[in-house]
Each structure stands twice: as structure tokens, then as C-alpha cells.
Image (cartoon, grey):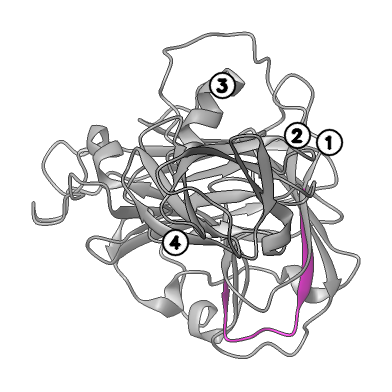
């Protein structure tokens, strides 16, 4: 079902939307990144992943844009094609997707008797009329279903209900913190994914050729733009009004997967810690929420000289680091190195010396 935007004043039950950051309000990594299309990853808006396959020649800019439909969100996710790709190799893809922990999907009851339907709704527009696809892909059992939707140059709300998947009782979602389901917006695909017959009626064991048959290509022209916001996934056959969520709630949900400290202005404090020796300090970052899993790496920006250690009445610029040391789901530690002058066991502050410096921890699916 497709309809124009409706009044968002209704207040049904809180927590029905399983999508995180569907209003496109949180962008910890960056508000805009250019030159995308050569690799997959998380680049701008939290929880929204770009899946690129087979090295397409197409390139685009991904940004958080203040152009959302009135009454739904001030923000939307925008993709702007900057390099076209009209010679499409078989394995090419451009997919905007979100992954879900199995333990957050148990309300669906998928794969067993009594499984429920799933309804996905969203607001979308583009520079012209396109046909794209929305797929639910069961990662635990390699089962999927896809429905097509059309764009216009105006904001339109699409409401798509996907059949319940009772299967034979052998394909429930795992009840854990791993990736069990992908909500995927197919915007470009080669024959490997478009050469079959679209699977629309029921969940079926995956056949790649049936995943995106009938879609247009976002990379068909550098004139192309794609805008989306108000994304909602809920149990049942009815698309309720988009759930308006307090920004602090959305941010906390996002920080379960990615937490960024900074960029900070000069001399702001990143974290506290202690000197492990005369040359190495350990900074401890307490996460604001429990992360999905223990981070295994540290993201940072700039050079060692962008970080400094405040110890006693002295401030010393770093000569190496920051480097990942260890992490739990509640905190992460990094090492910072100077040439000399620290006192082992002394408490310290890690401060910024450049406004682009940051520390970030990831537990993404």
C-alpha cells in the first residue's frame, strides 16, 4: 500500500518500531561523506550501512540533510549520484540497509507456528520516478522476501506488509546479540541479483537472482538523488504512525553499536586515566550505554600530536598513539605515548590539541 504522508499526532504504543535512527537524526561519524561506492561500510548516519558489491564504477555522496517531511522528521538520508555506472557487472550492488540483533526480533515469532506479519513503512522521494526494492533477509536461515516501491519528486509514505514466515518450525531467529535480520533498500544491482523472478509472496530459501528483479539503477545518471526518512518496521499487518522518539533515546540506542568522543575543541578532556610508565599513559573511556559486544579496535583521527596528557601541573604532547589497549562492553582503554616525563601511577587527563581529533569505539553488527 502507498499513500501520502499522514498526520503524526497519534501516539500508539511506544517501542513498536524496531528500526533504530529511522528519523535520520543521529550521525556520529559524519554528516556528509563524498566519493562513496568503492567499498561497503558505515559512513554517515548511525545504523545505516552501505553494501557495495563487485566494485561498481558508480560514486555518490551520502549525507544527513535537513529536508524531511513536515511533522515526521526535520532530517533525511540523502544519496547524490556523482559518477554514473551504466555498464553494470553481474555482481554489482548498492544497498542501504540496517541489521538487527536476534534478541530484538523475538516478538515476530518467525519460523514457527503463530509467526506474525512484518510491516515496513518509510517516507521517500527522488529526483524522478524510479522503482526500487525493499528486502527482508533472514541471516540465520538464508530466507528472504522483497517488495518493490516507486519514487516521485514529492515525499510519499510507502507501507509494505510482508507475509508471516511459519516455515516448517525450523527457522526462528536466534535469541542472541548477533545479526539475524537485514532490512535492505535495493538501489542498484547486476544480473546476479536481478536476473530472476522477484520473490514477493512469502519468505523463501534464498536465490540471489530473485532478490532484486525489476529494480532501476540509482547509478543511471549523475542527476539522480534519493531521499529517505521515517523508516519503521513493526509487527502485524498495519503501518501505524511513525513513532516519534526523544533524541536522547535514539542516541542511546545508536551508542550501543558505536560511541564517539569528540571532535572536541582545543584543551577539552577526552577521558581520564593513569600513567603506566614514564612514557605510556592509559586513558579510560566509560561508555554511556552497554555496548552490544566488546569493541576490538579504536577509531581515531589525526596525528599523535593532536592529543596531550595533563599530569600534575604539566601538559605533554603525545608522540605516539592513541592505540587500542583493551575493552569491555562498559568501557574501553587506549594507550598514549610521550618521549619521557610521566610519573608511573599518577592520574592524568587525555586532552585534545586539535578540533578534528576524536576517539570512537565500534560494536557494529
Q: Is residue 60 magenta?
A: yes
Which residue position holds label 4?
297
On the rendered structure, is 146 left or right of 230? left
Decide: marks 1, 2 in contact (CB < 8 A)? yes
Q: Counting other residues with Cα less than 10 Å from the Cα at mark 4, is it few (<14), some (14-19), or many (20 or more)?
A: some
Q: Nearer the viewer, mark 3 or mark 1?
A: 3
Decide: marks 2, 3 in contact (CB < 8 A)? no
Indicate which disc residue 75 carries.
2
Label 3: which secondary element = helix
Q: Is residue 23 magenta?
A: no
Q: Earlier in the sequence, mark 2 or mark 4?
A: 2
On the rendered structure, is 215 left or right of 293? right
Q: Earlier in the sequence, mark 1 or mark 2?
A: 1
Which residue position holds label 1?
67
Residue 109 x %, y %: 20, 38
Q: Nearer the viewer, mark 4 or mark 1?
A: 4
Q: Nearer the viewer, mark 3 or mark 4?
A: 4
Q: CA distance from mark 4 to mark 1?
A: 35 Å
On the rendered structure, is 50 left or right of 161? right
Which residue position holds label 3?
248
**Residue at 72% from the left image edge and 60% from the top image edge:** 305
Q: Nearer the viewer, mark 2 or mark 3?
A: 3
Amino acid at each position: 500500500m502507498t499513500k501520502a504522508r499522514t498526520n503524526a499526532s497519534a501516539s500508539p504504543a511506544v517501542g513498536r518500531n524496531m528500526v533504530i535512527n529511522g528519523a535520520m537524526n543521529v550521525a556520529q561519524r559524519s554528516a556528509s561523506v563524498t566519493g562513496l561506492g568503492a567499498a561497503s561500510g558505515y559512513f554517515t548516519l548511525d545504523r545505516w550501512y552501505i553494501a557495495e558489491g563487485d566494485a561498481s564504477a558508480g560514486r555518490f555522496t551520502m549525507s544527513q540533510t535537513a529536508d524531511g517531511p513536515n511533522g515526521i522528521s526535520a532530517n533525511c538520508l540523502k544519496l547524490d549520484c556523482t559518477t554514473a555506472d551504466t555498464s553494470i557487472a553481474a555482481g554489482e550492488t548498492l544497498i542501504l540497509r540496517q541489521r538487527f540483533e536476534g534478541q530484538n526480533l523475538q516478538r515476530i515469532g518467525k519460523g514457527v507456528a503463530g509467526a506474525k506479519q512484518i510491516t515496513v513503512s518509510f517516507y521517500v522521494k527522488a529526483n524522478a520516478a524510479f522503482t526500487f526494492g525493499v528486502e527482508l533477509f533472514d541471516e540465520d536461515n538464508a530466507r528472504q522476501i522483497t517488495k518493490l516501491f516507486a519514487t516521485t519528486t514529492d515525499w510519499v509514505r510507502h507501507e509494505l506488509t510482508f507475509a508471516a514466515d511459519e516455515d516448517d518450525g525450523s527457522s526462528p531467529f536466534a535469541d542472541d546479540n548477533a545479526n539475524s535480520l537485514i532490512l535492505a533498500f535495493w538501489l542498484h544491482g547486476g544480473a546476479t541479483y536481478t536476473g530472476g523472478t522477484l520473490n514477493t509472496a512469502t519468505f523463501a530459501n534464498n536465490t540471489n537472482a530473485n532478490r532484486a528483479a525489476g529494480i532501476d539503477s540509482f547509478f543511471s545518471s549523475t542527476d539522480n538523488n534519493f531521499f529517505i526518512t521515517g523508516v519503521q518496521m513493526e509487527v502485524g499487518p498495519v503501518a501505524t504512525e511513525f513513532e516519534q522518539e526523544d533524541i536522547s533515546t535514539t542516541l542511546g540506542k545508536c551508542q550501543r553499536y558505536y560511541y564517539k568522543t569528540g571532535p572536541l575543541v582545543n584543551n577539552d578532556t577526552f577521558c581520564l586515566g593513569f600513567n603506566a610508565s614514564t612514557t605510556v599513559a592509559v586513558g579510560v573511556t566509560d561508555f554511556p550505554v552497554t555496548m552490544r559486544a566488546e569493541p576490538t579496535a579504536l577509531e581515531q583521527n589525526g596525528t599523535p600530536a593532536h592529543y596531550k596528557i595533563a599530569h600534575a601541573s604539566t601538559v605533554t604532547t603525545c608522540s605516539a598513539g592513541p592505540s587500542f589497549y583493551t575493552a569491555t562492553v562498559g568501557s574501553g582503554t587506549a594507550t598514549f605515548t610521550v618521549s619521557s616525563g610521566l610519573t608511573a601511577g599518577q592520574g592524568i587527563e587525555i586532552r585534545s590539541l586539535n578540533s578534528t581529533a576524536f576517539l570512537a569505539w565500534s560494536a557494529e553488527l
